[in-house]
Image (spheres, rainbow, N blue to C red):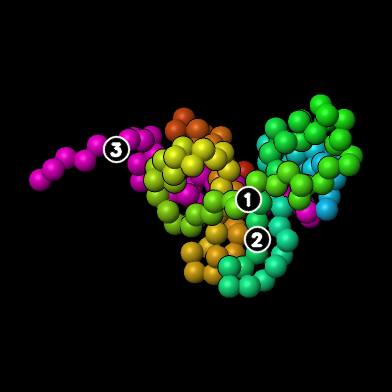
Amino acid sequence: MPHTIDRNPGLAGLRVVDAMHPGLISCRPGDPLRTVARLMATYRVHAVFVTAHRRGEEGDRWGVVSDVAVLRAAREGSIDEVTAGAVIEAPVLSVSSSNDLDAVADLMVERGVSHVVVVERHTKRPLGVLSTLDVARALAGFPERHPLPG
């Protein structure tokens, strides 16, 4: 029988739901980046999700504004003029809460993303977020999660 190598031994047996943060911090596409910066500071997050709430076959359309985008706008002096929708990174990668955490960690590295939306497998409704910091916490042996305030 062939022996398989576990690339992430610290993640063996864990699922996305074991490391994710329940809930999402989100804003509207028309919100200025200063508002997004306030959300980031208040909730101590590095990314805020943006949704247009357009229902269709694909459900809500999600994007993300990163702390780097906010910093870039601040340096350019346009943090009050630039909106979340103008700097959105889309589409956002979404994964099921029941996915193996090690496989999702590999996918995050392959795609070069630091945040994914965690969705319910059947309805595709957003349940929370998984970040690279959440994966690092699980690798360090601290898989417990702390819900976002709100």
Between residues 77 and 19, which one lies in front from this camera angle? 77
Q: Earlier in the sequence, mark 2 or mark 3?
A: 3
Task: Quarter of the image for the N terminus: give it.
Answer: top left
Q: Are marks 2 and 3 in contact (CB under 8 Å)?
A: no
What kind of residue is marked 3?
Asp
Percent position (x, y) of residue 136?
50, 33
Q: Residue 132, located in which quarter of the rendered image?
A: top right
Which circle's residue, 3 or 1, is located before the other in the chain? 3
Q: Amino acid at mark 1?
A: Ala
SS at mark 3? loop
- Tell me, yes or no, whether the two marked residues, 2 and 1, touch with CB atoms within 8 Å: yes
Distance of mark 2 from mark 1, alpha carbons?
A: 9 Å
Circle 3 packing at 10 Å, graded few (<14), some (14-19), many (20+), is few
Instruction: Between residue 24 and residue 111, name the one nearer to us.
Output: 111
Please state the horizontal and vertical placement of residue 14, each as a whole percent of the image.
Answer: 41, 46
Residue of label 3: 6
Residue 23 lies within the magenta run: yes
Q: Judging from the image, what secondary structure is the residue with disc 2 in?
A: loop
Q: Which residue is mark 2?
A: 61
Give the amino acid at mark 2. Arg
How dense is the environment of label 2, judged by Cα within 10 Å: few (below 14), some, or many (20 and up)? some
Name the main secondary structure of what is drawn in magenta.
Answer: loop
User: In the picture provided, is 8 more to the left or to the right than 43?
Assistant: left
Magenta range is 1-29
Whether residue 58 is visible here, answered yes or no, is yes
Q: Please tell me the numbered disc located at residue 90.
A: 1
Q: Nearer the viewer, mark 3 or mark 1?
A: 1
In the image, farthest residue toward the top: 75
Nearer the observer: mark 2 or 3; the answer is 2
Measuring from the top left, give residue 87's x and y in whole percent: 73, 44
For label 1, count other residues whose C-alpha is less than 10 Å away and answer few (under 14), some (14-19) or many (20+): some
